[in-house]
Amino acid sequence: MPISRAIAQQLENASWIRRMFEEGVRLKRERGAEAVFDFSLGNPDVEPPTAVIETLRRVVAGNRPGSHGYMPNPGYPEVRATIARKLARETGLDFVADDIFMTVGAAGACNVILKSLLDPGDEVIVLAPFFPEYQFYIGNHSGKMVLVDTDDEFLPDAEKIAAAITPRTRALILNAPNNPTGRIYPKRVLDEIGQMLSRVDHPVVVISDEPYKAFVYDGQHQPEVAASIANTAICNSWSKSLGLPGERIGYLALSPRLDGLAALRGACAFANRTLGYINAPAIWQRVINETADETINPAPYERKRNVLCDALKKIGYEVRPPEGSFYIFLKTPIADDVAFTRILAEQGVLAVPGVGFGRAGYIRLSLTIPLEQIQNSIGGFERAFLACNSRQC
Ligand SMILES: Cc1ncc(COP(=O)(O)O)c(C=O)c1O
C-alpha cells in the first residue's frame, strides 16, 4: 500500500534523530552498551517528584464515579481555573479558566493553536535553529514554515522578523528557554518583538512554546513572553518540568490581551476535539490540579552542564553553556557537522547534527544521559577533536 507522498518526504526530512538511533543500536551491538554514549535523545532522566506520584495514587484510589468519562473538550473547569490562577500570578495578566485548554502535551497545544489559526498557504515564522517538529506541526495544517535566522548568539532580531512578515503571516513561534540552543530570551528582546508586531497592519499571534521554563541555571529566569507581547498563545506541558513526557499532559493558554479572543476560544475547543485528542488525559488533569506548582529539581542538569562544558572547553571546543533547557548546542571543530557527527560516533558518542535544526556547523548534545556516562564520554570528545585538528578528518 503506497503511503502519502507528503509523509514519505517528511520521513526523509525527519531522519536525523532516527539515523542516530539506528547508529546507536549498531554501535551497542558491536561494542557493548557501556561503550556507547547517547546524547541524541531529550528524554528526561529525573523521576517525577514524590508528591506527584502520591497524588496519582490517591486520585486513582479515589475512583470517583464518572471520573473516567468524557468532559468538556477544553478540560475540567476546576483544573483550568487552577492553571489560570497560576498564570495570572506569573504574568500579571487576568487569565481566567476560559482562556485555558488542557492538551495532549505541548505538542498537542501547538497543533491546536496552529489548526485554529491557519488556512492553507498561511505562513508561520520560525526562528533558526529550531525544534524540528515545528515544520511538521505547521505542515499538519497546510501552513508554510518561514525560517528567520537568529544572530551568532542565537538571539532573535525584531527587524529581521519584520522583514519576513507578509500579508499571509499568521504566527511567529518563540521557544525559550530554547531547544536546541539553551538560550533564554531577555525582556529587552521580547519587548522589541512586541513593539514591532504592534505596528504590523494585521494580527500576528506569537505562539510561545515554553516546556523548558523550569530549566534555568545560574539563578536566571525566563521573562514572561505574554507580559511583553499582547497577541500571545502559550503552549506548555509537564513533560519536562515534572518528568512526565509519556503521560501527555499540557495546556494551551490564550492571553486575555489576544485580538479576537472569543472566536479563538471557540476554535481551540473545536480543534482539540476534531484533531482526535477529544480532551487531555482525565486522571492527569486531576493530578495536575493538585501539583501544578511542583517542578523537578533542575540542579542535576546544571551539574551535568557544568561538567560537560568545562571538559569540552579544556579540550579546545568553542562552548556557549546553555542558560536553560537541557541541551548544549556545540560548535563543531570542522564546518561539516554531519562529518563531525560521524567522527564522534566512531568514538561511541552520539549527537545530532545542527543541520537538522536549521544551523550547520553545530551539534546538539542532550544532558539527559547520566553524569557517570558524561564523564566516561570525555575521552571520545577529545579523540574526535584531536583527529580533526591533526587533519585526519
Ligand atoms: C521545544 C519543544 N516543544 C514541544 C515539545 C513537545 O513537548 P510535549 O512532550 O509536552 O508534547 C518538545 C519536546 O521535546 C520540545 O523540545
Image (cartoon, rainbow, N blue to C red):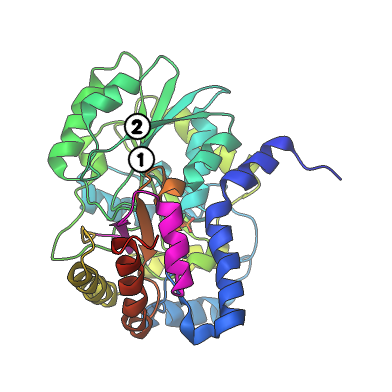
Q: How many neighbours does mark 2 have within 10 angstroms: few (below 14), some (14-19), or many (20 or more)?
A: many
Residues 264 and 188: in front is 188
Q: CA distance from mark 1 to mark 2?
A: 6 Å
Q: How many neighbours does mark 1 have within 10 angstroms: few (below 14), some (14-19), or many (20 or more)?
A: many
Above/below status of 321 relative to 301: above
Under circle 2, the secondary element is: strand
**In the rendered image, which quarter is residue 384 located in?**
bottom left
Mark 1 and mark 2 in contact? Answer it, CB < 8 Å. Answer: yes
Q: Is residue 210 left or right of residue 41?
A: left
Residue wearing tag 1: 128
Identify the disc placed on residue 148. Answer: 2
Tell me if residue 321 is in the magenta stretch: no
Q: Residue at x 42, y 76 (%)?
A: 45
* Position of residue 16 measured from the top left corner of the image (x, y, whole percent): 53, 54
Residue type, numbered disc 2? Val
Residue 97 visible in the snapshot: yes
Q: Residue at x 26, y 73 (%)?
A: 308
